[in-house]
Image: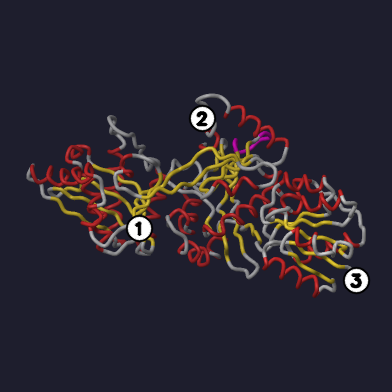
Amino acid sequence: MSNRVISVIDDDPSVREGTTDLLNSAGFAAESFKDADAFLNSGRIDTTSCVIADMRMPGITGIELHDQLQRAGRQIPTILITAFPRERDRTRAFQAGVWDYLSKPFGQNDLLSSIRSALQGEQRILYDHDRAAAVDAADPALHIEELSGPEAIEAIAHEWEELDAKISPRTPFTSPLWAKLWWRHLRQDRPTIRQEFFVHIVRDERGSLVAVIPLLITHRPGSGPVQLRLLQFFGAADGSITEHRCILCRESDEPRVIQTLASYLYSRKEKWDLFVWTGIRKHQIVVDLPRSAPQVYKKMPYFLVPLPESWESFRSGLSANMKEAIRKCYRYLARDGHAFSFRAIAKPEDVPQSLDRLLALHSERAQLKYATRHRDLFAKPSHRDFITDVALLMAQRNELRIFELEVDGKVVASRMAFLLGDELYLYYSGYDLEWRKHSIMTTLMCECFKWAIDRKIKLVNLSKGKDASKLRWRGSEIAFHDALLMPPTRRGDFISRAYNLLSSRKNTPHWRIARS
């Protein structure tokens, strides 16, 4: 095949050079062009036996070049390559007679095999579109592995923790410790609901851990011939004890991990009926997935407060109303002759009593009827056992703080927090309702910020939700998106139609199934 010239047309120099080198080393004669016009004006059309063209280029695109050659009577096999695979583009390309459609970065063997079959005039094998789209969307440099069971978490715990430490904003919910304890205490297995372990990891070509995907399959009901099988992340149906549920990966890796995961799940489409996909950083990522793109139904804001070097600098950046609220919260206690103290509980031996006080105050706060309602999340024994184990084990790692405000010898307000590197995640709280008129939660929060600033903490995560208690601290808002993904099956099509029908009705909470 040494006399067969392959013309490589791509506006990306690295792709041109890499592809040309590959073809030359494989025995082909390859030439490269920066765009379609350069190729058309080169005088090399007659000697070209195969065209490899980028789907998207300035000027004439790859598909437009193919169409133009066809109209001119040039039946040159064309292989389109793209970094943005779309099912509609793939369908259009094959309908136009394009030989093949490959996603960047493509496998060397895949490209060479496609070229050889094109030059030999072999009949192109048409695959099931769902399978073909899934294969093309996946990043060939990534490999997904399914963990065998909960015991397998321990085997990768060190790698998992290293990856978790590199991601910001940090939360306790993405750690292997949280996952192990959640499965032990909160996994549901009863006649009405059964949760099946379905955790996966993603590695690159070097074997390095790129992502952890802590999935489970929720069967509703737990057994029987007719079940709804929900794919969900660990933390599903725990009443928001797990505040953030997502794929654990670097933000820069998220697009290719999402593409690869979706492709992997499509290839196992008979195993699930609906993926309740939470914690997506950028919802634009999902729109290029093949066929049944995830349908984004909710945006969840988180508020992050970067800390300056001093409390005065922090306070000066707040609104005039908030500055007045801070003055009042301290003045109320002093006016009534009350002295307060603040402490951060950290020693493991001090945690049990401090946690008992926090949970009692959390339960009391849930009784308040005349403000934003807060549920008692730890009323169930299993929930209480879980958070107790989390607190004790994280205290042993020096990653737990329980902040307490004591007035006249009695703890009247408390908040749990997780110290993760140079970031502080503020978790659930509670307070004594008798002291509400003294704005003790504002006082506690001020003392928490002072404590964090004194220890050079860079970022305070106020957790999810857009309420006044977060907005008042002038944090920066970041958003994560929740979506529903349906498999390309008859059941998936039915669920998709039902979803669209519900979505079209006014005031219909069409995400209800995802919250279950």
> What secondary structure is found at the residue carrying circle 1?
strand
Q: Nearer the viewer, residue 154 or 341?
A: 341
- Region in magenta: 220-226
- Residue at left 57%, top 65%? 209
Figure quadrant of residue 109: bottom right
Neighbours of disc 1 within 10 Å: few (<14), some (14-19), many (20+)? many
Is residue 69 toward the left or the right of residue 33 in the image? Answer: right
Q: Which mark is residue 3?
A: 3
Is residue 113 toward the left or the right of residue 454 in the image? Answer: right
Q: Which mark is residue 509?
A: 2
Is residue 229 toward the left or the right of residue 404 in the image? Answer: right
- Residue at left 67%, top 56%? 83
Q: Position of residue 460 (x, y in %)?
A: 34, 55
- First in residue order: circle 3 vs circle 2: 3
Neighbours of disc 3 within 10 Å: few (<14), some (14-19), many (20+)? few
Q: CA distance from mark 2 to mark 1?
A: 34 Å
Quadrant containing the N terminus is bottom right
Residue 488 drawn in magenta: no
Is residue 349 toward the left or the right of residue 297 in the image? Answer: left
Q: Which mark is residue 459?
A: 1
Q: Nearer the viewer, residue 257 or 38?
A: 38
Q: Position of residue 461 (x, y in %)?
A: 37, 52
- First in residue order: circle 3 vs circle 1: 3
Q: Position of residue 180 (x, y in %)?
A: 49, 56
The answer to whether marks 3 and 1 mark residues whose Cβ atoms lie closer than 8 Å is no
Q: Nearer the viewer, residue 486 or 132?
A: 132
- First in residue order: circle 2 vs circle 1: 1
Figure quadrant of residue 54: bottom right
Which amino acid type corresponds to the residue marked 2 in the rendered image?
Pro
Q: Which one is closest to the eye, mark 3 or mark 1? A: 3
